[in-house]
Amino acid sequence: MRTALLPLVILTLATVACGRPEPGLEQRAQRLESQIICPVCPGETLDQSQVQVARDMKVVIRERLNAGESEEEIRQYFVDRYGTRILAQPPTSGISLAVWLVPPVGFAAAAIGLYLVVREMRRRRQPAGTGLSGASEAGLGPYLKKVDEEMSGERDDSA
Amino acid sequence: MMADLGTIAVLLGLALSLYAAASSVAGRLAGIPELVVSGRRAAYMTIPAAAIGSGALVTAFVNHDFSIKYVYEHSNLVMDREFIWVAFYAGNDGSLLYIATVYAGMAGLAIWVGERQRPEIMPFTSAILMGVLAFFFFVLAVFANPFAPLEFSAADGLGINPLLSHPAMFVHPPLLMAGLAGIALPFAYAAGALISGRTADEWLDLARVSGIVVWAILGSGVLLGAWWAYTILGWGGYWGWDPIENVALMPWLAMTAFIHSVMVQKRRGMFRMWNIVLLNVAFVLAQFGMFINRGGPVVSVHSFAASTLGAVFLSFMILSALFAFGVFFWRYPMLRSDRPIESFLSREVAFLVNNFLLLGIVFVTLWGVVFPLITEFASDGSVTVATPYFNRVNGPLFLVLIALMGIGPVLAWRKASGASVRRWLTIPLLLSAATALGLASAGIREPIAILAFAVLVFVASVIAEEWIRGTLARRRAGDNWALGWWRLLNGNRPRHGGYVVHLAILLLAFGVVGTQFFDQRGDFALRPGEAATIGDYRLVYTGSEETPRSDRVLRTGSIDVYKGATFIETLRPWHAFYPAFNQASVRAAIRSTPIEDLYVVPSDFLSDGRLVLRVSINPLAWWLWIAGPVFIAGTALALWPNPATETRRAPSPARPPAAAGPSSRRPVPGGQAEPGSTA
């Protein structure tokens, strides 16, 4: 399994290392359009919105990119005019840092919790001892053999 | 006349559902079976009561009875007549009446089936089902009466929202609302059993089957909503992580967790508490969805007009949560697992991880929906949490979840052997690595997309591997390929139906990755005769024609599409402006192929004669919509009842001890020994 995974990992790393070609002006404009909310239509980004305001803002984005402004400067330009709510994803600062931090922290905590619970559930089986005795398992032999026969060719986990 | 009839029907429905709930409980507690029977009959009678109410409203629409305010607000004389059915549930009041009607039918069916299988839990289950119905009728009677009269007389109505004039509207809202309301069914079975003191698996099969049905209804509703958005909202997308979309997705995800986790209880007698928790969570999330939908505090493109109903639905949601978890904690000491977990490498643990991821996505989505509200209270500047956030945080979780679809099925119950896992996963992993290599050498430079495609191939080949090996075995027994495969599927329908649903999810994911990572788009303003170029396509705008309609200005553009120099076809998207609403409704023209969609939508006809076109190339979008029928087929296969002949395959007198003992070192083969059990 590991030998099969290896090329996948190498390949992914290689692709990441190669990187993507430098995006053109249109790509950068479209990226911004998907990051900025249309001020008059709730929850829709500029590229989703059909209203005139959104179309005007798309023009502004292209003009500013043409004038050599960076994407960050253009985002800031809109934030200055409309406030942070114009950004489709909250900034990673101030109170809205929480929106980014809570999921990973919550996951980590829940994953640890899950691990502990499963470990605890595994421990419980030691004193339980409700299993079959060797004799009764031997008595089941013919049945289990029949199950195996039915299983042949299908996915059997007893291999 | 219709208004009176409808009002009476609603009041009657309220009285009947209250009586049904009260007499079921009283009859059970006092030990008077006649009272329980009477309650049950009252429950059945809510169906005609609700149906008469709905019938009255639809009749009022058909007759253009504008003395009823709701009819006045949602229809007019010139609207296309078939959309009267849509107008019925286009607003708050009518949609609640629709929900009450469809829910009364579902609850009646649930009571009828439950009575035949588990009569001992039914008094409390019916009471819960009827309590929910009584709430709907109560809201209809007091806060949202669809039969309220119009204060003035009107010759014509306002008409239906133009965005709703779409074929998907005949099925998307009804399925979505039915699915959301229907989550009460599996919940009521479980909670009813707990209150009755039946804390083993009495509720299990009823809740599992009804849970899968409402889950499939809700899932189809969500997917049809995506299709509607794709063809009408005019931005070339299908999912916007809008609050309303999110609140429908969350209970669906919680139910997905439940229908996986319930298999562990069915087969191994484990996770009893956990399954109840999942149903409680799904039920409360469904109430949360109704609350957000009806006057909740979140802005959305498709919430109903702001209304006072928010507080009512919020109260009901809180009550539901208190009730659900109150019952759970009351019975908590009685909910014991039969067996412990034996190994981290086991199907039980795979299901736990599946639940963990699904609930993780629910949690992220919920957090994204409520976070803007938190900031609004906590600081002056509010923030927006929209698509980029959800894609970024949920995207990886979905990918891991899909990868798990390839690993879970090869793990045995109790304890999987490393050798067996290796044997099953080697070929899929090699195929998946080959896919990644192939895509990268073909010049694709999106690492995440490559990884995603590799994962999809991995899962698909795990399923294919099982089908091929199983079919081969049947071929040796003399079947041909097709028959052998079909018999394999038939031999364990829940398991293979589940695989078909997994394939549907893969198709969906295939479309999502294609459209998310490789779409191209552009906005063009063209005069007749001018052309635009996007990708390999050249689009020539040849002109438009205007069709006069009574309620709208309908303009259809003609666009000749060339690929290279060859003419392919003429696309005719249309744009309809409704003066009464000061709103436009557009219909995209889509040239759909399995490789890519060419999507053309007219954003606007400018006064200088130019047509503003939004054009996009959406690779693999075709597969998104193929997923729907496959999803339904898989669910139907999984739920198809077992004919009597099935039982003869399992000569299982020894089954309980065989499956029980931790000291038995022989793993029970997953899902194959007993047909009908889900693996």
Image: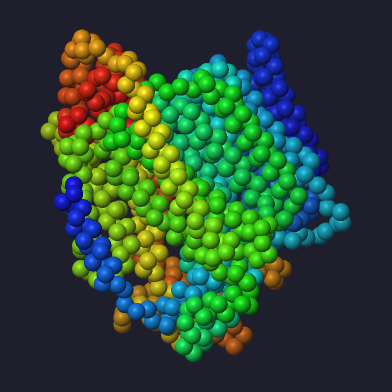
Residue closest to the eye, B546 or B294: B294
* Residue B679: quadrant of the picture: top left
Q: Is residue B351 left or right of residue B544?
A: left
* Residue B486: quadrant of the picture: top left
> How many marks on residues?
0
- Residue located farthest toward the bottom when viewing the structure as drawn: A67
Residue closest to the eye, B362 or B625: B362
Work out whether A144 lies above or below B527.
above
* Residue B39: quadrant of the picture: top right
The percent coordinates of residue B30 (x first, y second) are 69, 11
Q: Residue at x 49, y 41 (%)?
A: B254
Asked whether the viewer can see residue B461, the reply is yes
The percent coordinates of residue B120 (x first, y second) are 55, 16
Q: Residue at x 28, y 42 (%)?
A: B407
Residue closest to the eye, B366 or A101: A101
Q: Residue at x 65, y 25 (%)?
A: B127
Work out whether B671 lies above or below B593.
above
Asked whether the viewer can see residue B220, the reply is no
Work out whether B430 lies above or below B120.
below
The percent coordinates of residue B351 (x first, y second) are 37, 37
- Residue located farthest toward the right when viewing the structure as drawn: B152
Q: Residue at x 51, y 30 (%)?
A: B276
Name the quadrant of the N terminus of chain B. top right
The percent coordinates of residue B446 (x first, y second) are 32, 67
